[in-house]
Image (cartoon, grey):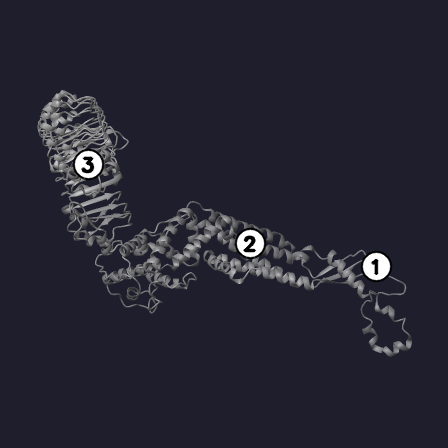
Amino acid sequence: MFSLSELAPLNQHQSRSKLLKPWWEVFMDYLVVLMLMASVLACTEQLSRDRVVCVPLDPLVTPNTSASGAALKPSLKPHVQRNLGPNLHSTARGRRTHLVYQQYVYVSQVCYHKALPLYSRFFPYLAMLQSLVLVASGSFWLHFPHTSARIEHFLAILAKCCESPWTSQVLSHAARQESIQEMEVAEKRPPPRPPLSSTSPSPSVTRTRRTSIDSGTDSPLLKRSFATPPSPCPSTLSCNSTMSSTSQVHCPLSKPSGVVDSPRQVTSLDKSDGEQTRALFERVRKFRSHSESSDVIYKVYLAQTIFKLLMVTLILSYSIPLLSSLSFTHTCHPEEQALVGYTTFECIHVLSSLLRKLLVAYLTLLGLYGLLNLYTLSWMSHSSLRQYSFHSLKELCSLRDVPDLRNDLAFLLHMLDQYDPLLAQRLSVFLSPVSESRLLEESVERRWGEEKLRAMTSVDADGCCRLQLVALPRLPPALFTLSQLQVLKLELIADARFTAQVANMTSLRELHLYHCAAAVDPSALGVLQDRLEILHLNFTQASEIPSWVLSLRNLHELHLSGRLNSDGGVGRSWALGSLRQLRHLRVLVIRGMLQRIPVELCEVTGSLVRLDVYNEGTRLLVLTGLKRMVDLTELLLQDCRLERLPSALLALTNLRTLDLQHNNLRTLEELLSLAHLRRLSCLRLACNRVLALPACIGVLRGLELLDLSNNQLQSLPPALFTLRRLQRLLLAGNLLEVLPAEVKELQLLTELDLSGNRVESLPPQLFSSCLELHILNVAHNSLGSLPAGVAALTRLCRLDLRSNSLEDLPAELGGCTGLHGGGLLVEDWLFLSLPPQVRDVLSRSCPRSGTYPESRSRPQSDSFPFFSPTQWSFSSALESQI
């Protein structure tokens, strides 16, 4: 057993499914019900009253009987005839059959099955069976497994769309925009002439649309009260009533000239309604992609219509010829003469007249049913039911972007239009990208207010006010009120648009766009051209670079990170375009996969002083473009798979910094050609495959920093120590076993890095001559002892002795005042070998408790596995000071 409450979902589904039944389907349902009632009535009558009544036609001839009443006269006595007088002839009429009642019953039963046609006996049951088949086939497309789930999903989505408060806001805004446009047209239109006749003009299209919008409240799906307050006059949607009763939704499309917007009254959805509306947009999008992939509902409906038409044709084909068999009288030959005494009986069918009338009515209803099926086929053949376009809705301002639909979704909307076009209009709100964009805008406005954005801002080490926004649907309007913001980072924002309000961001100087194709309004472009100085762009393909970037005339730094190389070869490896307008560009950083130095960079050679190329392992084949960049002072070519020093460097006479790290350099014989680069002071060749340092290194007299870390050097030439201006010498990660005594010539040396080599001893000349040494890193070597002369390095502030073969430390380390407070990096047990007084001096002002746990727990660097992060940060700070 089941309760009545369990039938509620079924009743609800039946009431919702009628939305997809056009008028002919509803009419056919009523016709089938009438046919079913007629068949049930015939069945009831046949079960209760169906019988035949029979009388004999030929009397049995016997000597004592006569067939006529006249033969009875002689048998009467004379005095009886005299007493009857004139009544004798009236009572003698008729024919005596000499049959008893049981014989009549027997004959009637026999003749019912023998004389009565089969169609007269089984027509009611056959009609009821046919009606049941038509009932089942009439709703087959709504319950077929491959269509019912999709139809139920569609009806559920439609109900949510009609109940959503967002639907009312968008439609009321569309009606208001239409009213405004009508008022504008009416103002421009000349005053109408007096009517020539008393006939009333036909209603306008606008009025019809208003009526359809208002009539939507009569739909059974719209019984839920909306979040927006109801209009005080529900029968009309005039401009005044709409503006006062519903929230105003901004129309993103262009407005007619001369139209002045009234002050915006925002009645945004609350948090729960907003989340439900966004979820509904996603649900509609997924259902659309699923239902547009096939047309199974259309095919099932077409097959159902054809099947019903064939059923009607079949029923009519055998029912009409058998109509004459439903006669009133029948002749019966029971062949039971020995039992009843007669061979022929005349029988009458009691229900023949009623059954004939019911059959005529049934066939009439069936004919109408067949005509409606013919109309359905003609409608399907003359209408493109696999495509649906919102032509009437696109006349409204906010709904012009509703896309055309195909296949099953289009067919369902065609069926829905037969019930009420308003329902399709309400569904179109959730198909409109502009409507979804407006919803996201309201959501962003509510969640990302000015107070929250100010709380997210931070101040970096340079004192700049920074803000980073990640994975937002669009830029919050409150962002443009942050006048103190200097650095803005935007990442994975789908719809980032800078409007004219960016003029309020008076301090904005730096912009980062990480996989964010930002759009700029024309009114905002001029502001960015005047204020923006640094721009970082991260992208996947060069086509994602916004075109407005090339017009930022005051841009000083441009950082590009993405795939700038195409698969077409060297000739098409650049896709940024002309840089002619970037006349103030001084720094260009490219992280991509270039195959050549772009010739387009020649357009900014007059201002460009720094070029950084991180090529991500792609071989840089053509470097001739460098020859025109004669004003470059810094050049970085990392991870470009260079095997030799580029000959194009000869033209860069103003070069001061050359960075060729992470390449495939094996020989440095070309260093001789760099002799005329007299301003070159920094040369970085780390992470290559250099086997030997040539003697021509001595021609680079102006070098102050030489980085040869992570190569394969086994010895150092004496010419290296003729570079008297050298202040930083980085030789970590090589195969050096000896540090030559000629190192004493580098009296300006402030940093020496020998970590990760095979050095067994340090020359005493290092401690007696290089008195300017601040950093000495000999970690991960094979040192057996440390000379006592280390006390002469009074400016030494960082000494790394970890991972060596030292057994003790000289007490003279206490004289290195710069090591106080944690400048000595050594194992704990080795530090304990120092005298207690020295340990106390070296530990003084140390921010950490105990003896140097830093030397044990420091994580290792990625580039140099034997360096600690603290050491590198210290070196970087010192480098910046120098």
Q: Which residue position is annotated with label 1?
A: 339
In this view, which residue lies farthest toward the bottom?
83
Q: In the rendered structure, which amino acid carries the disc numbered 1?
A: Leu
Which residue is nearer to you in this view: 554 or 34? 554
Q: Residue, x 73% and y 57% (percent of image)?
A: 113
Q: Quadrant of the C terminus?
A: top left
Check whether the beta carbons of the residues at disc 1 and disc 3 lie within 8 A of each other: no
Residue 871 numbered mark, or none: 3
Q: Specify whether residue 9 is in view.
A: yes
The tag on residue 136 is 2
Q: Position of residue 417 (x, y in %)?
A: 42, 56
Q: CA distance from mark 1 to mark 2?
A: 50 Å
Front residue of 249 and 589 = 589
As measured in the structure, the alpha-carbon distance from the residue carrying label 1 to the one carrying label 3 is: 131 Å
Coordinates of residue 850 in the picture (x, y in percent): 22, 41
Under mark 3, the amino acid is Gln
Q: Crowding near pointer 1: few (<14 within 10 Å), some, many (20+)? A: few
Residue 649, x across and y down, in percent: 14, 27
Q: Nearer the viewer, mark 1 or mark 3?
A: 3
The answer to which of marks 1 and 3 sits earlier in the sequence is: 1
Q: Residues within 10 Å of mark 2 (few under 14, many from 20)?
A: few
Which label was assigned to residue 246? none
